[in-house]
Image: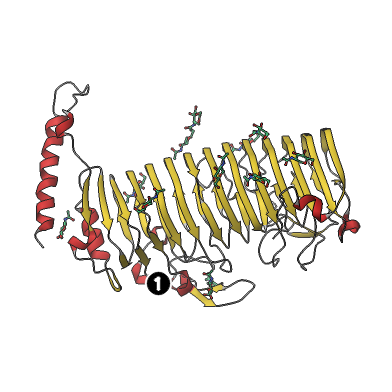
Amino acid sequence: MDTPLLFVLMLQLHLLLHLAQSHPASPSSIELPVSIRPHPITLSVSDFGATGDGRHYDTAAIQSAIDNCTCSPCRVTFPPGNYLTATIFLRSGVVLDIQEGATLLGGTNMEDYPRESRRWYVVVAENATEVGITGGGVVDGQGSGFVERFDQRKNVMVSWNQTGACTGDECRPRLVGFIGCTNIRVWNITLREPAYWCLHIVRCESTSIHDVSIYGNFTSPNNDGIDIEDSNNTVITRCHIDTGDDAICPKTYTGPLYNLTVKDCWIRTKSSAIKLGSASWFNFKGLLFDNITIVDSHRGLGFQIRDGGNASDITFSNINISTRYYDPSWWGRAEPIYVTTCPRHPKSMEGSISNLAFINITANSENGVFLSGSKRGLLRNLRLKNVNLSYRRWTNYADGWVDYRPGCRGLVHHTTAGIIMEHIEGLEVENVYMRWSDEHSKRWNNPLDFRPSTVNNISLINFHSGLYTVREVESEGGAYA
Ligand SMILES: *[C@@H]1O[C@H](CO)[C@@H](O)[C@H](O)[C@H]1NC(C)=O
Ligand SMILES: *[C@@H]1O[C@H](CO)[C@@H](O)[C@H](O)[C@H]1NC(C)=O
Ligand SMILES: *[C@@H]1O[C@H](CO)[C@@H](O)[C@H](O)[C@H]1NC(C)=O
Ligand SMILES: *[C@@H]1O[C@H](CO)[C@@H](O)[C@H](O)[C@H]1NC(C)=O
Ligand SMILES: *[C@@H]1O[C@H](CO)[C@@H](O)[C@H](O)[C@H]1NC(C)=O
Ligand SMILES: *[C@@H]1O[C@H](CO)[C@@H](O)[C@H](O)[C@H]1NC(C)=O
Ligand SMILES: *[C@@H]1O[C@H](CO)[C@@H](O)[C@H](O)[C@H]1NC(C)=O
Ligand SMILES: *[C@@H]1O[C@H](CO)[C@@H](O)[C@H](O)[C@H]1NC(C)=O
Ligand SMILES: *[C@@H]1O[C@H](CO)[C@@H](O)[C@H](O)[C@H]1NC(C)=O
Ligand SMILES: *[C@@H]1O[C@H](CO)[C@@H](O)[C@H](O)[C@H]1NC(C)=O
Ligand SMILES: *[C@@H]1O[C@H](CO)[C@@H](O)[C@H](O)[C@H]1NC(C)=O
Ligand SMILES: *[C@@H]1O[C@H](CO)[C@@H](O)[C@H](O)[C@H]1NC(C)=O
């Protein structure tokens, strides 16, 4: 057990070098010779006494390893094993290296989490720079331990609200959080069974999320995949998300969100695959979603702008979508594309959406597209280009509703249509093929439905609508299941 001491000595040596380097009178950089530049330090949690047996808490050992990482960059390694832990706090310069075969298991008792509910995560970094998680292993929130009553429609979850720590029925820990951080890297890691949201990026700058798989529970509410709040310059690539609630969900609570790119992802969810909002107090600007496959989801590409923030300059390209109905207790009515602004409460502000493009999109869906602005929250300059929409019913859930939730008018009876439109200023439709299955859907063969509200400046170029046989679409590679 004398290894830690050796590491401490090495760390001190590096610290001395670092001080020597930062001392010169002129702040202009003096490069150290390559040979004595600090190499990344690696500390193993085993050397700090972690058992990895999945039964004893390894919290103290893991936190000691992290706290001994005082030199950047520093890796804290988890060899294969199961590490049960209460909340662990990352610090600047530290990357958790959870190796293949290693699983970090979040505790399921309230005492495992800090006093303030806003810090309830299994792993959290606050105000840190150069932090990350990698290694090919797993972080698991043991979400099943938070299921109070299994219900095949929607599980009823435990809420720790009795203690007054927070209110409502969403009072449970998230899995991994970065709050107020800069230069974050989360790559090559599996995040599993969060009790609540999974990966939470809050007020961060420069985040890269790459090769991350998320497996939530398809029946548990609030099992969001990645929630990005009030953060700039976020890039998500090669993600795989299979979960019950919204998969990728940008929100604004305390500041704007700029520059989010999401590419090369696969998503299945019982809610929205991509959802902006519903928290939307500030603006969203400069978002790109490209090369994404969405299967079996309740809603594909969604905007729920409800609180006065404006969304602009947003592109969705090269996306295949299959959306279907699920139980209506889950928001969504099988819409492949859902763009809405409305005041959450009668007195809420109304945000608008402008410069929005959907290019190279193929959808096989049980319901149509819903484009619904509001009086003071217009949809401006929308473009649909190279979009193929195929409509067919294959579940037995009832149709004939439009879904304004959360807030606004709630669920409203309305006949189904290919594209429903209201409060739009500028809509360009180009190369759009809308196809209706020849099986059961004749009764809702209604391509364009202008609701009795403003819809101005529409241009339709090469817009087709007609029946198809199922075989026709399947031969083009449009999968249904
Ligand atoms: C370093 O680890 C040792 C345990 O090996 C622990 O006692 C000590 O508090 C740690 N140092 C810091 C700065 O956390
Ligand atoms: C992080 O920074 C914010 C804003 O400066 C501050 O309110 C908060 O207490 C800091 N948190 C920690 C853990 O240092
Ligand atoms: C992920 O980590 C594992 C274990 O270290 C490694 O074998 C694998 O190559 C890594 N994959 C990627 C894509 O980096
Ligand atoms: C979801 O949770 C329920 C209840 O705990 C459990 O029976 C089921 O196996 C879980 N499903 C998955 C995919 O984890
Ligand atoms: C606590 O959560 C339950 C659901 O788990 C909910 O019914 C109840 O209203 C909540 N109580 C408070 C005070 O938030
Ligand atoms: C994001 O950029 C905007 C515009 O420059 C700025 O107001 C906001 O503070 C930035 N947010 C963060 C978390 O850096
Ligand atoms: C967003 O990206 C653009 C283009 O790269 C850049 O000019 C701008 O500064 C970025 N915005 C923020 C808030 O970082
Ligand atoms: C699209 O994403 C998939 C992963 O989901 C990847 O295999 C494929 O190479 C990407 N295609 C392009 C053109 O980048
Ligand atoms: C949204 O746009 C409206 C109209 O330009 C503006 O009054 C409002 O302040 C904007 N909202 C935010 C959060 O900037
Ligand atoms: C749309 O698809 C066409 C044909 O595959 C391609 O040439 C074009 O670059 C794509 N557009 C975008 C914005 O990806
Ligand atoms: C849409 O269907 C048309 C006609 O079958 C086809 O030419 C076009 O390539 C398809 N577009 C996309 C984006 O799949
Ligand atoms: C969408 O489906 C078409 C036809 O099967 C396929 O060529 C394309 O790669 C798919 N794109 C995505 C992003 O899944």
Q: Residue furthest right?
A: 443
The number of discs equals 1
Question: Which residue: 14% across, 22% down?
Answer: 25
**Residue 33 as seen in the image, left or right of residue 272:** left
Quadrant containing ligand 11: top right
**Residue 307 as seen in the image, left or right of residue 168:** right
Image-quadrant location for residue 104: bottom left
Q: On the rendered image, what quadrant is the N terminus found in? A: bottom left
Question: Which residue: 14% across, 46% down?
Answer: 11
Mark 1, secondary structure of its residue: loop
Query: Looking at the image, which is closer to me, 1 or 410?
Result: 1
Residue that carries the numbered disc 1 in the rendered image: 108
Where does residue 339 sit, x and y in percent of width and height?
70, 46
Q: Is residue 305 visible?
A: no
Vertical placement of residue 167 versus 437, above or below: below
Where does residue 361 sit, x and y in percent of width and height?
69, 42
Question: Which residue: 40% across, 48% down?
Answer: 186
